[in-house]
């Protein structure tokens, strides 16, 4: 569980990408990965945040 300070830190950083719930579910399905509510929610909340040049948060990295 993250603290309010953790959430504030993430909000100050930009996201490289943001996905809709249906996009996250589609990517998990294509990867034949579990689509639990917890995994989907984690990706929606944190996926794409870049906390430093070498680290992008998320369960998977979105690319085009």
Image: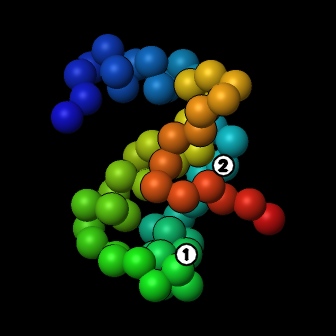
Residue 58 visible in the picture: yes
Q: State the count of labels.
A: 2
Left or right of 2 on screen, residue 16: right
Question: Which residue matches tag 1?
Answer: 27
Q: Residue furthest top?
A: 5
Instruction: Judge whether 39 appears above or below 30 on screen.
Output: above
* Quadrant position of residue 38: bottom left
**x%, y% of residue 56?**
59, 38
Left or right of 8 on screen, residue 14: right
Of the residues under marks 1 and 2, which one precedes in the sequence?
2
Instruction: Judge whether 30 appears above or below 28 on screen.
Output: below
**x%, y% of residue 15?**
63, 38
At horizontal 19% and vertical 34% (from top left) the residue drawn is 1
For the residue labelled by badge 2, is the local secondary structure a helix, a strand or a loop? loop
Left or right of 47 on screen, residue 15: right
For the residue labelled by badge 1, is the local secondary structure a helix, a strand or a loop? helix
Alpha carbon distance from label 1 to label 2: 14 Å
Question: Which residue matches tag 2?
Answer: 17
Mark 2: few/some/many CA within 10 Å (<14, 14-19, 20+): few
At horizontal 36% and vertical 52% (from top left) the residue drawn is 42
Q: On residue 49, which mark appears? A: none
Instruction: Judge whether 20 appears above or below 26 on screen.
Output: above
């Amino acid at each position: 569980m993250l603290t309010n300070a953790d959430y504030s830190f993430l909000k100050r950083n930009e996201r490289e990408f943001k996905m809709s719930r249906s996009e996250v579910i589609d990517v998990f399905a294509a990867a034949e990965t579990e689509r639990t509510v917890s995994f989907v929610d984690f990706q929606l909340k944190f996926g794409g945040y870049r906390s430093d040049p070498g680290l992008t948060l998320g369960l998977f990295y979105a690319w085009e």
